[in-house]
Image (tube, rainbow, N blue to C red):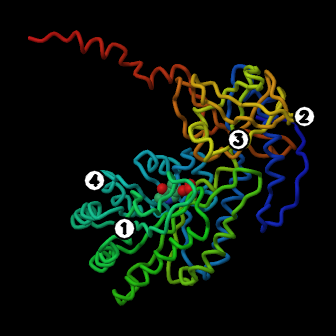
Amino acid sequence: MRSGNGRTGGVVDDGNSGRTGHTDRAARRDEAVRAAVEQGLLGPELPIAALLDVTGIRESAAELRAAFEAVTAPGTPVLHAFAVKATPLVPVLRLLREEGLGAEVASPGELALARAAGLPPDRTVLDSPAKTPAELLEALALGIAVNVDNPQELDRVDALMASATSRSPVGIRVNPQVGAGSIEALSTATATSKFGVALRDDGAREWVVRSCLDRPWLTRLHAHTGSQGVPLSLMAEGVAETYALAEEINRRAGERRIDTIDIGGGLPVNFTSDEVTPTYAQYARVLREAVPGLLDGRYGLVTEFGRSLLAKHGTVVARVEYAKSAGGRPVAVTHAGVQVATRTVYAPGAWPLRIAAYDGKGRPKSGPEVVQDVAGPACFAGDLLATGRALPLLEQGDYAAALDTGAYYFAHHYAYNSLARPGIYGFAPDGGGGVAFATVREPQTVREIVAESGGAHATALTALRNTPTD
Ligand SMILES: *Cc1c(COP(=O)(O)O)cnc(C)c1O
């Protein structure tokens, strides 16, 4: 798929600042929206599509690698395991694999996606608070890294390790209990978080130390304390606590028993502009300040970033089906709502999204800003992408784009009103001044919706009532 659009300008990026490439990114997005309309990925019969900026994803992966290379001693093994949860799409995992990243998985489905993308076991990490015996067995048989969540899970792993040998590095997930960020539902390091071993609870820290001293194969510690809303300093505090625990274990073991620390992910994302802030480089510097020993080459590192790698590279574009007015407020009824922006619709205060307005040809809309609502297609009043937002007036046949939706949005479909999963397309320059698209995920068909909704079992319930008894 090609288009003849010339690329519009861009800013030379210094590869270093928080403003890296942000003007370029916006220009690429505008071109992609126009090309998607021109090339028929969007239109009256295809009123919603999601776009992924391949150039931007590669840039973020490179920034992540460079940030940790800049602060770690030469030769330090570092695995950046992308949190598959954030964007569970096989072509995305494959792209990141090519960029040198691995995968952090937390369910049989996510592990299958990582394997389908060709991620090797030594670049895969399994976390999850609810691993079944079968999942543990599979992970240990494959040799992928496993982070044990709790004492009951360690019992299971003990039994499996006693009956077979495994190449899997095994760690324990700890919760340093350093406190919450601004979004309670996403704060993993509170006193009562459901994840990992709560280090400050009575006897817990000593249990972790003893567990490691007793098992030569327990060689890692894992903590994932960041997330949207958590400041860098608090994230670093969680990492520092984990590092201190590793040092204690190694001191008491008299050897380097813990050889790798998995610092988790959770770098917050700026949803208010195209600027990337905070950057990986800033976080890496905060870590160097707070925990220099972690980076001096004695420990291997694993990271598990998700949202920060993908969020800014995704855009969901939806056609304005109707433009109406209610109570004096203009309302654009679009095809993007709760099915692609679930968090924003149900928790608009915590998850506001930027909206960009495009005309019917996919060109950025200009004109005076008008305060309006941008609504989705679902049949409940709260299905709104944005309320009271000042934008050029959206009219019938225009497009509204929800920005920064590359993670935890359109790849996390919510099947309200049996709305179809939109197609997802990656885009990149086509080499001839235009935009090339590649299908990442086909749009879901109505036939698939019926099949996934028990279509093959249409008479299951009526037949059950009529089953004769004897
Ligand atoms: C969700 C999660 C991540 C990724 O978090 P982001 O906020 O998307 O970076 C990493 N590790 C674990 C264990 C997680 O649960």
- Which residue corresponds to mark 4? 133
Number of marks: 4
Q: In the picture, residue 278 is in which quadrant? A: bottom right
Q: Indicate left or right for 355 with 162 as reference.
A: right
Residue at position x 46%, y 67% in the image: 223
The answer to whether the residue bearing label 4 lies less than 8 angstroms from the nearest atom of ligand 1 is no
* Label 2 neighbour load within 10 Å: few <14, some 14-19, many 20+: few
Query: In the rendering, at what x and y percent does residue 438 appear?
Result: 69, 39
Above or below, 160 against 219 in this view is: above
Query: In the rendering, at what x and y percent does residue 18 appear?
Result: 76, 64
Above or below, 378 against 210 in this view is: above
Residue at position x 74%, y 22% in the image: 327
Q: Secondary structure at mark 3?
A: strand
Query: In the rendering, at what x and y percent does residue 414 appear?
Result: 53, 33
Q: In the picture, residue 47 is in which quadrant? A: top right
- Front residue of 354/437: it is 354
- Front residue of 55/407: it is 407
Instruction: Tell me the distance, in whole angstroms, between the alpha carbons under discs 1 and 3.
Output: 40 Å
Q: Which mark is residue 315?
A: 3
Q: Secondary structure at mark 1?
A: loop
Instruction: Tell me the distance, in whole angstroms, between the alpha carbons under discs 1 and 2.
Output: 62 Å
- Which residue corresponds to mark 2? 368
- Which residue corresponds to mark 1? 167
